[in-house]
Image (cartoon, grey):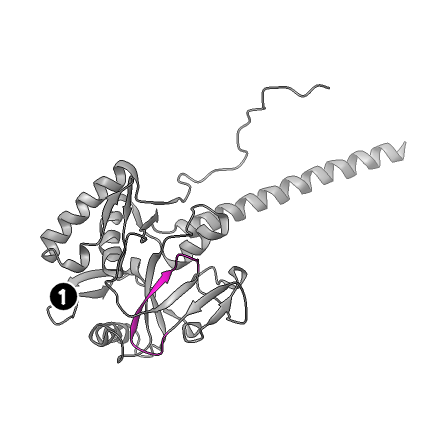
Amino acid sequence: MKSMENKFQGKPLIELPKEIPSAGFLVGDFGKEFLKEYNGKAKADYSNNSNLQVLNYDDKIVKGSNDFAVVLANQILRQEGLRTATQADLEKILKINALDLRGTYKDSGLVLRSEDGANKYLAQNLAKQLRARNKKTRFPVAINLADLELVNDKDSNYGLAFKLTERANPIYAPILNKPGNFNSEDIDEKTGLPKQTKGGNRILYTRKDGLSGLCLLRDLNLGSNGGDLASSDSGGRVVAVSAEGASQNLEKYVKKLNQEKARQIAEIEGKYDSALRILTSK
């Protein structure tokens, strides 16, 4: 039989999610509108703090990034049902090749190792907040930038400080004290962090103390050693993802697809066995 030119147009036999999780850079008219809102909020709420004046719109995309800017970006994106990407989101994006992340850096979190050393004032401030929630807090702790809000603080070297949101879920991550190589297969899907550093084609960079940024670097290595939380250049990118539960919804959807696949296979095999018994009984 000659193959038909027109393809069969069928309908899904399972319930599809109302919104498929998505991720993207801040581009086009949306990116331009976002930046206008961002600059307005930086001026109105944070006195045009110079550490926030790091984003610009060029080549139809928002460029630049530092930890403070991403936290403010998240506050704006949440109004649109979005949020900034966590390290777990970035690793999921890499895994399914949803975006080309190579060649740019993406700030995703903070790493608190001790109350002294780099960014001592902010480290002590965050440690106090963490212990107020859990007296048994252990270091190192990773905190998603999407779980923070910005506050003005004249005692901070940056003129800004971080406040844990109610939804914040700090991650105790001893691996962040173990620099070395890892593979993408070593990633813990829940945290986006390596499970081990025992060899591989990617590198985890760490430091000994204080508060540092967590960043997916241009070469897809993982940096948790940056002490300057305000550093930014045109290679930075803010990644937005569907809001709460995006990654969980995707996992549930895939699980449901696999269950339906198994059900249909079992049904077909049952019909095959039944037909075979009828044929062989004659």
In this figure, which residue is indicated by the disc labeled 1? 159
Identify the residue at horizontal 58%, vertical 23% (top origin).
Answer: 7
State the residue in front, 114 or 118: 118
Label count reads 1
In the rendered image, the vertical position of residue 43 relative to residue 173, given as above or below: above
In the rendered image, the vertical position of residue 143 relative to residue 256, given as above or below: below
In the rendered image, the vertical position of residue 30 relative to residue 127, given as above or below: above
Residue range in magenta is: 207-220
Identify the residue at horizontal 18%, vertical 54% (top origin).
Answer: 53
Quadrant location, the C terminus: top right
187 lies left or right of 116: right
- Residue 30, image quadrant: top left
Membership of 108 in magenta stretch: no
Identify the residue at horizontal 82%, vertical 36% (top origin).
Answer: 276
68 lies left or right of 15: left
Residue 96 location in percent, x, y?
49, 48
- Residue 57, image quadrant: top left
Membership of 212 in magenta stretch: yes
In the rendered image, the vertical position of residue 140 relative to residue 18, given as above or below: below
Disc 1 on helix, strand or loop? loop
183 lies left or right of 61: right
Residue 232 location in percent, x, y?
26, 58
- Classify mark 1: residues with Cα within 10 Å, few (<14), some (14-19) or many (20+): some
Identify the residue at horizontal 49%, vertical 52% (top origin).
Answer: 95
Residue 201 location in percent, x, y?
52, 63
State the residue in front, 171 or 46: 46
Quadrant location, the N terminus: top right
Residue 26 location in percent, x, y?
30, 44
Q: Amino acid at mark 1?
A: Gly
